[in-house]
Amino acid sequence: MIRNPIDVATRVSPNLSALIESRLNDADIDPPITLATIRTFVIGLLPAAFTETEQLHHFDVNESLLDELDGLIDEFGETALAIDFVQDAASEPLSRVIEAVMYDENRQAPPTLGAIKEAIFSGLLARLVGEGALDEDEDDGLLAEIDTLIERYGEEALAENFLRYE
């Protein structure tokens, strides 16, 4: 199977990206996991009556995961590797933390994921909450999120590569 040369993950909704990532992390599934594999999983989750009704009436205003998958399959084929469609971006609150470290005038080198974690441990979150750049409830999961990124990409990965611009 050939990997897609373009960054197709930017065209995937966060919900579908999270679903694909959860399936990729499931140890019971044999690789390679393709878009067709993900579609089969999604169809298996939905009762038959729901999928028929949804196709006829499209109750939700947003595109369903099944519709989104069908569009991706039409464009990239059933055998496209699902891993290509997982978004590798920080959440909006973590992006604000990364930017705060990036724009620190005392910083001499671009920050890595390890440097972001170190800044979090050094009290950056409290400062950003105090400045109003982060809400009090936004800082709860940031340490777990940075740990996940470090686990996947390593401490030396440049943090700016994970910024999310919305």
Image: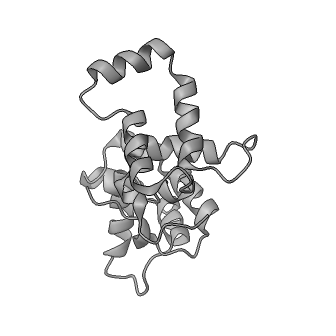
Q: Is residue 76 visible?
A: yes
How is colour applied across the structure in the image? one colour
Residue 94 or 86: which is nearer the viewer? 86
Name the residue located 74 percent from the left edge and 44 percent from the top edge: 27
Name the residue located 59 percent from the left edge and 71 percent from the top edge: 155
With respect to residue 161, does 62 lie above or below?
A: above
Quadrant in which the N terminus is drawn: bottom right
With respect to residue 147, does 108 lie above or below?
A: below
With respect to residue 158, does 130 lie above or below?
A: above
Q: How many marks?
A: 0
Name the residue located 52 percent from the left edge and 68 percent from the top edge: 113
Name the residue located 37 percent from the left edge and 45 percent from the top edge: 71
Q: Is residue 124 visible?
A: no
Dividing the picture into quadrants, the one containing residue 57 is: top left
Residue 34 at x, y = what percent? Answer: 58, 50
Quadrant in which the C terminus is drawn: bottom left
Residue 83 or 153: which is nearer the viewer? 83
Residue 14 at x, y = what percent? Answer: 40, 45
Residue 6 at x, y = what percent? Answer: 41, 69
Report the residue that reaches farthest toward the bottom: 108
Report the residue that reaches farthest toward the top: 49
Residue 46 at x, y = what percent? Answer: 50, 21
